[in-house]
Structures are given as C-alpha cells and as structure tokens.
Image: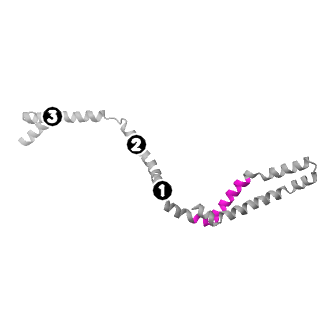
Amino acid sequence: MSDTASESQASAGGSGLSAEERAELERLRAEKDAEKAKARRRRIGWRAPVATLLIVLGCVLAPLSVLGVWTANEVSDTGRYVANVTPLISSPPIQNALTGKVTDAITSNLNVTGYVNQAAGTLNSHGFTRVGTLLQSFGPSIVSAVDGFIHSTVQKLVTSQQFAKAWV
C-alpha cells in the first residue's frame, strides 16, 4: 500500500520526492515548457517558399540541362556529326527538299515576270507593238521555262559528287 501512496504523491507533485528529484522534475518541466513555447513561435518564414521555388526550378531545368548536354556532346564531336550528316545528302527526299528551297529562293529574287513585262513595255513604247504583245502573251511560258531551267540546274548541282564533298 505504501508503494501506491508514494506513486500518487509523486504524480500529484507531493512531498514524497527528494530535493534532488524535485529539482530534476522542475528542470524537466521548464525544459518542456520552453520547447512548447519554441514550437508555438515557429513560423514558416522564408525558407519554405524559397525551397519550394528552387525544387520547382530544378525540376523545370533538369530536362533542359540533359538536352543541352546531349546537344553539346553530339555537336562538339565532329566525327559523330560528320557520320550523321554524310548520308543525308545522298537521300533523294533531302536532295529534293534542298533543290526546292534553293530554286524558290532564286526565282523569288529573280522576278522574271517583271522583266518580261518591262521588256514588252519597252518594245511597245518603241513602236514594236506586235512583238511586245507577243512577248507579253508568252510571258507565263517564259517564266515557266526559266523556273524549269533553274530547277534542273540546281538538281544537277545538288546531286553531284562535288556538292556531296562540300556538304561533308
């Protein structure tokens, strides 16, 4: 019975504790109260939003860095680059696309229709109206012939061995 009585006195903070035990109990209670106060004062502050921002930024930039490293390794290795680019020029779809782009660039800067109309106007103004009218009526055929000539010349150039060597 005395054990239960001393336990009830100890739990109630009774006088059953020695001075040393009592001091230890008070020290532990003070420590616990300080921790509770510290926990109440703890705020989110600036660290959590900054950490979240850095994590999101890292997740966004990680794929970009992988792509950048891959590109740098692919392009900086000239042997690999030449090995990848060399077979492209002998591929007919690449040759046709390149021929089409070059032909379009040349014909858009050449303006054959404008030259035909200017020549027909000059002939008409000098009294050669019949030749000027004839030239103007054949204008679309002339434009088509010039475009065809440019296309065939560019096609020959793009499919030549010299161009393949220059490509590499």
Residue at 46 percent across and 52 percent down: it is: 63
Answer with the quarter of the image where residue 42 lies.
top left
Q: Nearer the viewer, residue 65 or 149?
A: 149
Q: Is residue 27 above or below residue 94?
A: above
Which label's residue is closer to the chain start, 2 or 3? Answer: 3
Residue at 70 percent across and 57 percent down: it is: 103
Q: Which amino acid is tagged 1?
A: Ser
Left or right of 73 in this view: 133: right
Residue 166: image location, x then y, percent:
60, 61
Question: Can the viewer see residue 12 in this picture?
Answer: no
Q: Which amino acid is tagged 2?
A: Thr
Q: Which amino acid is tagged 3?
A: Arg
Left or right of 57 in this view: 39: left
Quadrant in which the N terminus appears: top left
**Residue at the disc numbered 2:** 52
Quadrant in which the C terminus appears: bottom right
* Secondary element type, mark 1: helix
**Residue at the disc numbered 3:** 27
Separation of marks 1 and 2 at Cα, in angstroms: 35 Å
Residue 107: image location, x then y, percent:
73, 54
**Residue at the disc numbered 1:** 76
* Secondary element type, mark 2: helix
Query: Label 3: how many residues lie within 10 Å, few (<14), some (14-19) or many (20+)?
Result: few
Left or right of 117 in this view: 85: left
Q: What residue range appears in magenta? A: 87-107
